[in-house]
Image (cartoon, grey):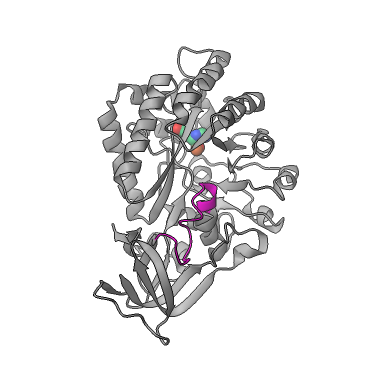
């Protein structure tokens, strides 16, 4: 496939660049009036229309008519395998109950676990696939999906099997995370559940790429987290951690000392934690749609970037704190509420997000040899306009590994 007359080809990154940090986050490679060639689902080459345009070799030619071509979004933190909705709690929230108060009343995550328990595996797959299709149509071609609404061995494994089935049935890249430690399952004490999670690890590891712990006030302590991550590491699982959503939880420190790939949420982070993250391979991931939905502070992404760190952004699509998987909305919140520039937000949603889910070698940028995971916009769009006209439709086509979806 050959795409011609691209108004702006954005997100060009040289081979070997795995993430962007600090000042690098304010830059991305751009070619104006360009073409791009896809061979066998991969980006083969690209250049300017004024130079030699390759022969289409009888392949399909798409005239971009001046539209922008950009890498598809990578959503490195989602909980899209869940049953039904929590609309009832939405009303409780409107009436003034906080996320923690809803959880303390036995609602929240436990509510979703009860629903998931009653939902047959095929039905869970069907509902989850609707969300996956919605996300792909909105431009996400890579997504991480967590378990964590099972909260007992049988239901956690049911979730992980559904994620594996999604992985096998969509052209998007899917990564699976075992989040047994999302809340204490019904019928367990705190201590017995932490042990149960550790006992689930060997079987869960066969179906997972990563492990996660909700290290936060009212959920799991830093000691629980360290124990679980140590056991997970001996099963070959690297960590991605929920940290600092409800409180300064110590999750950042545990994540750094356990060699986590990412620490996520970070609605409340101290300067000391920014210092700890410097010089580490850990990617800070912020989830502005949860801040928006729950009325929490927005992550201090500018301070992180100012300190020379990279930041990634994800949707956190889940029924309790972010019932949306729209990465363009995440971009708008990052620009409007966190005051990132459109280019910084774009790097956070693409290359850095790919890094945060371990797929930066195959997706997240326009780089020869990577999968052709691309968004072609309607004519007249630029990176700056995406978060500005933040509800106006902008997508003409989404390609996952070169396949239009
Ligand atoms: O990332 N914080 C923990 N987990 C999810 C919310 C889960 C839920 O409420 O269902 C989150 O916000
Ligand atoms: Fe989450």
The C terminus appears in which quarter of the rendering?
A: bottom left
Residue 197 in the image: x percent, y percent?
51, 22
Residue 122 in the image: x percent, y percent?
25, 31
Q: Quadrant of residue 319?
A: top left
Q: Quadrant of residue 377?
A: bottom left
383 left or right of 405? Answer: right
In the image, residue 368 lies in the stretch drawn in magenta:
yes
Asked if one can make out residue 88 in the rendered structure from this viewpoint, the answer is no
Q: In the image shown, does 41 or 383 lie closer to the viewer? A: 41
Residue 113 in the image: x percent, y percent?
40, 24
195 left or right of 398? Answer: right
Q: Quadrant of residue 204?
A: top left
In the image, residue 365 lies in the stretch drawn in magenta:
yes
The span shown in magenta is 353-371
Residue under the point 44% across and 72% down: 9
Residue 302 in the image: x percent, y percent?
65, 56
Asked if one can make out residue 170 in the rendered structure from this viewpoint, the answer is yes
The N terminus appears in which quarter of the rendering?
A: bottom left
């Amino acid at each position: 496939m050959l795409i011609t007359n691209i108004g702006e080809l954005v997100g060009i990154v040289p081979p070997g660049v795995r993430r962007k940090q600090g000042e690098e986050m304010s830059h991305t490679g751009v070619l104006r009036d360009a073409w791009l060639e896809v061979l066998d689902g991969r980006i083969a080459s690209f250049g300017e229309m004024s130079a030699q345009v390759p022969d289409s070799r009888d392949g399909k030619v798409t005239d971009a008519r001046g539209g922008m071509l950009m890498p598809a979004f990578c959503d490195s933190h989602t909980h899209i395998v869940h049953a039904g909705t929590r609309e009832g709690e939405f009303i409780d929230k409107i009436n003034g109950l906080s996320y923690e108060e809803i959880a303390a009343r036995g609602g929240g995550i436990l509510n979703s676990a009860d629903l998931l328990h009653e939902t047959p595996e095929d039905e869970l797959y069907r509902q989850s696939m609707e969300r996956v299709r919605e996300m792909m149509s909105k431009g996400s071609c890579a997504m991480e999906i967590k378990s964590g609404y099972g909260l007992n061995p049988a239901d956690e494994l049911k979730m992980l099997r559904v994620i594996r089935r999604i992985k096998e049935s969509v052209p998007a890249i899917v990564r699976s995370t075992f989040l047994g430690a999302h809340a204490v399952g019904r019928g367990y004490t705190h201590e017995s559940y932490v042990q149960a999670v550790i006992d689930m690890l060997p079987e869960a590891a066969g179906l997972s790429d990563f492990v996660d712990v909700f290290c936060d006030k009212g959920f799991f302590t830093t000691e629980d987290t360290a124990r679980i991550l140590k056991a997970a590491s001996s099963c070959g699982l690297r960590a991605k951690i929920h940290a600092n959503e409800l409180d300064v939880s110590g999750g950042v420190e545990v994540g750094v000392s356990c060699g986590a790939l990412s620490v996520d949420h970070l609605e409340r982070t101290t300067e000391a934690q920014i210092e700890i993250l410097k010089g580490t391979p850990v990617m800070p991931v912020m989830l502005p749609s949860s801040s928006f939905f729950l009325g929490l502070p927005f992550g201090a992404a500018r301070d992180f970037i100012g300190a020379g760190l990279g930041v990634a952004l994800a949707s956190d699509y889940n029924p309790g704190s972010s019932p949306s998987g729209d990465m363009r909305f995440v971009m708008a919140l990052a620009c409007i509420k966190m005051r990132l520039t459109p280019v910084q937000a774009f790097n956070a949603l693409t290359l850095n997000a790919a890094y945060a889910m371990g797929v930066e070698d195959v997706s997240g940028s326009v780089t020869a040899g990577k999968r052709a995971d691309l968004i072609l916009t309607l004519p007249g769009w630029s990176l700056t306009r995406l978060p500005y006209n933040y509800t106006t439709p902008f997508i003409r086509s989404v390609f996952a590994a070169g396949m239009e979806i």
